Amino acid sequence: MKKTKIMKTIIHKADTRGFANHGWLKSHHTFSFAGYQNPERMNFGMLRVLNDDVVQPKMGFGTHPHQNMEIISIPLKGALSHKDSMGNKRAIEVGEVQVMSAGTGLTHSEFNDSQTDEVNFLQLWIILRKRVLNQIMSNVSLTLLSVKISCKLLWRQRIN
């Protein structure tokens, strides 16, 4: 019989997160990131980064590299423009999720193209246990995603 792993529950209250204010960027860090270092908050399993970022109008993250990780961006307010070395260029908006597999390596940038409005988004980095070769980009509508999950749950209920 296969053993079931039970994942530990850890609660990190919002006011205990790291915070950085760079003027153009306000960022809350759940785990150690950049100037915020807490040896007891390095990761949660394969989840290495969970940042809540607010980027000022016409500002953003210049081109930078990633490899062997999944990068997930979820806009909460405004639109986040993305450009990468795979030739993708697109803005993701509230109601969408962007998943990027960095594979053996890629570069990308993220910007707030708005003249007047801030963009607020969550970004997650998942470190992969196995080396992945391909770089992949996917944008998913949260509405479509919730419909797909609901259909799968309904289907499972019908066959069980």
Image (spheres, rainbow, N blue to C red):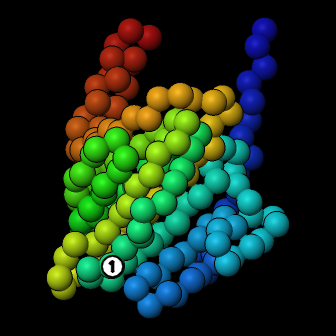
- Looking at the rendered image, the quarter that the N terminus falls into is top right
Taking 65 as reference, is 81 left or right?
left
Which residue corresponds to the image point at 31% horizontal and 55% vertical from the top-left? 83
Instruction: Estimate the x, y position of residue 17 in percent, counting from the top left.
Output: 63, 75
The amino acid beneath tag 1 is: Met
User: As displayed, is residue 7 above or below residue 150?
Assistant: below
Residue bearing the label numbered 1 = 59
Q: How many marks?
A: 1
User: As displayed, is residue 125 above or below residue 113?
Assistant: above
- Looking at the rendered image, the quarter that the C terminus falls into is top left
Which residue corresponds to the image point at 34% horizontal and 13% vertical from the top-left? 158
Which residue corresponds to the image point at 59% horizontal and 71% vertical from the top-left? 29
Taking 37 as reference, is 25 left or right?
left
User: As displayed, is residue 83 above or below residue 5?
Assistant: below
Assign a secondary structure to mark 1.
Answer: loop
Instruction: Estimate the x, y position of residue 2 in percent, counting from the top left.
Output: 76, 13
- Residue closest to the eye, 126 or 143: 126
Instruction: Estimate the x, y position of residue 89 in percent, counting from the top left.
Output: 24, 51
Q: In which quarter of the image is residue 116?
A: bottom left
Q: Residue furthest bottom?
A: 23
Residue 87 in sight:
yes
For label 1, the crowd category at 10 Å Cα-Cα, with few meaning under 14, some 14 to 19 and many 20 or more, is some
Q: Which residue lies furthest to the left in this view?
A: 115
Instruction: Estimate the x, y position of residue 126 in percent, counting from the top left.
Output: 58, 46
Residue 95 in sight:
no
- Residue closest to the eye, 126 or 4: 126
Which residue corresponds to the image point at 56% horizontal and 29% vertical from the top-left? 132
